[in-house]
Amino acid sequence: MKHLAKSLFTILVFGTYTASLKAETPQLNYLRHCQGCHGDAGQGSVRNSVPELEKAITKFLVYPEGREYLVQVADISQSPIADQELADLLNWMIKSFGTKEIQRKFVPYNATEISEPRLNRPANTRELRQKLTVKSIHSAVSD
Ligand code: HEC
């Protein structure tokens, strides 16, 4: 029993150590940090007010403030991964769940585009979200 506990402890310590060494793939980061709420296909959940990612991407990605806002969404900016990994995750998310048109036009995020807005989130992202949603409706982008 003591032996088993020691082995388990070694596996745990070694596992945590190696996991912290290598950068994870965007898909694995999505699974770890996003999928629990947003679903495996980005479908979201009406019951829990989690938006469908395809719609959210279309709504916000069409103009620069929206592109920046996507970095500042609480669960995105605060996910415990480095800027480059977050850029890779957003790029993967948009390629995987964006509409065909978005996928064609999308210019990938780079790490610099992540670090500045991530550090300087507005105090009230809800207000910003509301403003951008109204702007999006006015530019005739579907909600
Ligand atoms: C705890 C549940 C939860 C987790 C985890 C989560 N989200 Fe969200 N997400 C939400 C909810 C709820 C909203 C709706 C906006 C709000 O209420 O803040 C949202 C909104 C969004 C939006 C649309 C922005 C908007 O204002 O509508 C995107 C894009 C998004 N999330 C991506 C992600 C990504 C990428 C991750 C992982 C890094 C993630 N989310 C993790 C619950 C979650």
Image (cartoon, rainbow, N blue to C red):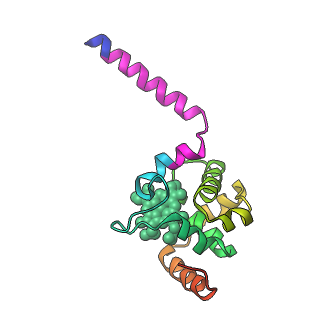
Q: Position of residue 37 (x, y in %)?
A: 41, 57
Residue at 52% x, 64% y is 53
Name the quadrant of the N terminus.
top left
Which residue is outermost to the bottom? 138
Is 58 rendered above or below residue 28?
below
Looking at the image, is 4 positioned above or below residue 40? above
Front residue (pair 108, 131):
108
> Eyeballing the image, is 76 above or below 128?
above
Specify the principal SS of the magenta part. helix
The x and y percentages for residue 41 are: 49, 55
Residue at the extreme top: 3
Locate residue 117: give its quadrant: bottom right
Q: Position of residue 105 (x, y in %)?
A: 74, 66
Residue that lies at the very extreme toward the front in this rendered image: 100
Instruction: Decide if residue 2 is on the left or right side of residue 25.
Output: left
Horizontal and vertical percent for residue 134?
55, 86
In the depicted view, which residue is nearer to us: 97 or 16? 97
| Residue shown at 42% from the left, 66% from the top | 50
In this rendering, does residue 62 appear at all? yes
Asked where in the image residue 54 lies, by quadrant, the reply is bottom right
Q: Is residue 23 magenta?
A: yes
Q: Is residue 20 magenta?
A: yes
Q: Is residue 75 visible?
A: no
* Left or right relative to 24: residue 104: right
**Residue in view at x 47 percent, y 46 percent:** 32
The range drawn in magenta is 5-30
